[in-house]
Image (spheres, rainbow, N blue to C red):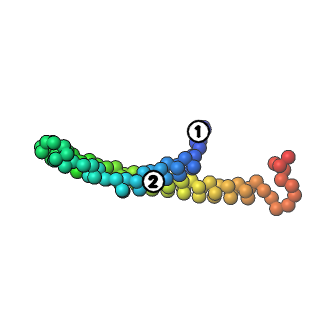
Amino acid sequence: MADGFKVDLDSLDKAASGITDTLAKLQFKKVSDLDHKKEDIGHDHLADVLGHFLKRWEIGVENLGKDAAQVSQRLNASVKAYGQLDGQIAGHLHGTLSRDSGEDPGAK
């Protein structure tokens, strides 16, 4: 027989919020904002290579951001689903374990 499992809804919710907060911060900081002017780098070819690298890096960061947004959405959906199921089960148990009249025999 399986021992079952426990889901920490608060931790799932915090993880989703943390991802969302990080993504919000990334909207204001772009990899392409890193300075790569030829005069600052001191070498034309190196500055060009760095510029191309930063463009590719930005694409990678954008793709990771999209993936992270999906993870956050799925964590939020899991929290919602587990919360609803927990409420449904609690409702069924309340009706099963209580009665309309008399003392609760399990309260003693």
Q: Quadrant of residue 90?
A: bottom right
What residue is rendered at 86% in x and 55% in y?
103
> Which residue is labeled 1 in the image?
2
The residue carrying pointer 1 sits among few (fewer than 14), some (14 to 19) or many (20 or more) residues within 10 Å by Cα, namely few
> Which residue is labeled 2 in the image?
21
Where is residue 59 shown, x and y percent of the image? 27, 52
The residue carrying pointer 2 sits among few (fewer than 14), some (14 to 19) or many (20 or more) residues within 10 Å by Cα, namely few
Q: Quadrant of the N terminus?
A: top right
Secondary element under disc 1, as helix, strand or loop, is loop
**Residue 48, labelled with which disc?**
none
Single out the mark in the foreground, 2 or 1.
2
Residue 24 visible to the viewer? yes
Q: Earlier in the sequence, mark 2 or mark 1?
A: 1
Viewer-side residue, 104 vs 55: 55
Q: Is residue 82 left or right of residue 104?
A: left
Where is residue 4 shown, x and y percent of the image? 59, 41
Q: Is residue 101 left or right of residue 64?
A: right
Q: Name the residue type under label 2.
A: Asp
Report, in whole angstroms, how far the alpha carbon at label 2 lies from the one at label 1: 37 Å
Viewer-side residue, 16 vs 27: 27
Where is residue 29 shown, x and y percent of the image? 34, 53
